[in-house]
Amino acid sequence: MHMGLGLIVTKMSNIQAIRGMNDILPEESIRWIRFESIVMDWLHSYGYQNIRTPILEKTELFVRSIGEVTDIVEKEMYTFIDSLSLDSLALRPEGTASCVRAVLEHHLLRQAPQRLYYMGPMFRHERPQKGRYRQFHQVGVEAIGFAGPDIDVEHLLMISRLWRLLGLEGIRLEINSLGSSDERIEYRKKLIAYFEKNLSVLDEEAQRRLYTNPLRILDSKNSQMQEMINRAPRLIDVLGKESQSHFSLMCENLEACQVPYAVNPRLVRGLDYYNLTVFEWVTDQLGSQGTVCAGGRYDALLAQIGGQSSPACGFALGIERILSLLSRDFGGKLEPDVYFVNVGTSAQFHANIIAEKVRDAGFSVILHAGEGAMKTQMKKANASGAAFALILGEEEVERELVGVKALRLDVAQQTLPLDAALAWMRACPRSGDKLSGDE
Ligand code: ATP
Ligand code: MG
């Protein structure tokens, strides 16, 4: 018996998707397609270019970039040992590290600073709930080689335009500055001293992180610690001149562009690579999964993963969360222009040939496949949402004609040569939906 994978198959049982990883079925998928298409147009309108990196990376990349003492690296990453290379590999939990790795590996910064974007699945082993999945999807945007704060503002302007393009309201912007690493070292001491005085309020995780990564404690979701966290010293109060000027320039620019924001001095983000600007866009409509977009500046990251140092900033949009804010019918419907009815052996034979010609003319066509009586096929044509049925029977084949019926208008069915039928469909007034054959 073959047991190479260590699997013992006892009984044929149903195989289901992995918990926290969703199938996106056609009715839902069409909403994703519409979203992705709006997003791509939006990004291209700001000069951002697409980059695609592998979903698997060396685990080391994420440990070095996201930071060892973070939720993601400590407990959320899917890692395994590759049986051939014995490397530790990880399913990417986010996209910035991979994007930066690719930029460095291919020396893209030798040409010019880079405005880049990507979208796709990310993987985190968290407790699945609404708005929180183990495979989820992000749109990621990175501007690499820019010191800001003009580019930081560009990102925030872009995002507020995206909400307008999607027709979304009530998404608030919260910003903060994490200063420079020297400033954080100073602040860290103050913070540790403060937490030491409040040791009894710290939960187990916070106590463990007290000396390794005390800033992370500010990011805690434990409600019992919130009051204590709110009274903690604030990094933004101890920023040096340069950090302050970066932050205030950004704020002034946002005001000039009429982008409302609130300064949230507790905002630290769950990844260690940020400095200066950090931000989140938050809605009240999604409960505790209310952050739909997050990002900031990561000037030290390139050097940290072993490359040439270069300033950079970026953000990620959580696609599932944004889609759940959009209406059910956001994607519209994928309705064909034509449902092609074909009855009889020779009609069936000619149907594919003619349907290709109809598609050449710019119409979308669902060809009835398999046999079936005229009545059954016409029922399917009506149910398909198509504007027209083209009808091919033995007699039409013989006379080199085709029947054409407007399914949503009260006009008589025609029998015409194909070219005339195409012209007739083009001239036909359309009820309701715009059809691709018009364009
Ligand atoms: P959270 O605090 O909600 O865990 P995060 O700080 O871990 O979020 P980021 O790493 O900044 O999130 O990712 C950016 C965005 O990706 C989030 O704002 C959110 O919209 C989305 N996101 C993050 N994790 C998940 C997940 N497990 N499922 C669905 N969306 C997610
Ligand atoms: Mg998280």
Image (cartoon, rainbow, N blue to C red):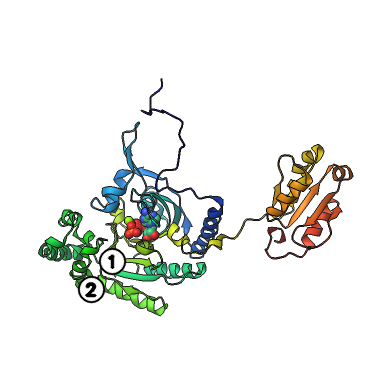
Q: Position of residue 395 (x, y in %)?
A: 87, 44
In the rendering, at what x and y percent does residue 230 appear? 21, 70
> Which amino acid lies under the numbered mark 2 shown in the image of this protein?
Lys
Query: 202 or 65: which is nearer to us?
Result: 202
For image coordinates 35% across by 68% down, the residue present is 148
Determine the secondary structure under disc 2.
Answer: helix
Pick the quarter of the image with the N terminus: top left
Residue 321 occupies quadrant: bottom left
Residue 61 vs 423, above or below: the answer is: above
**Three-letter code, disc 1:** Leu
The disc at residue 325 is none
Q: Is mark 1 within 8 Å of ligand 1?
A: no
Residue 139 located left or right of residue 430: left
In the rendered image, which residue does mark 1 sit on? 267
CA distance for labels 2 and 1: 20 Å
Furthest toward the top, the residue is: 1
Residue to which mark 2 is pinned: 241
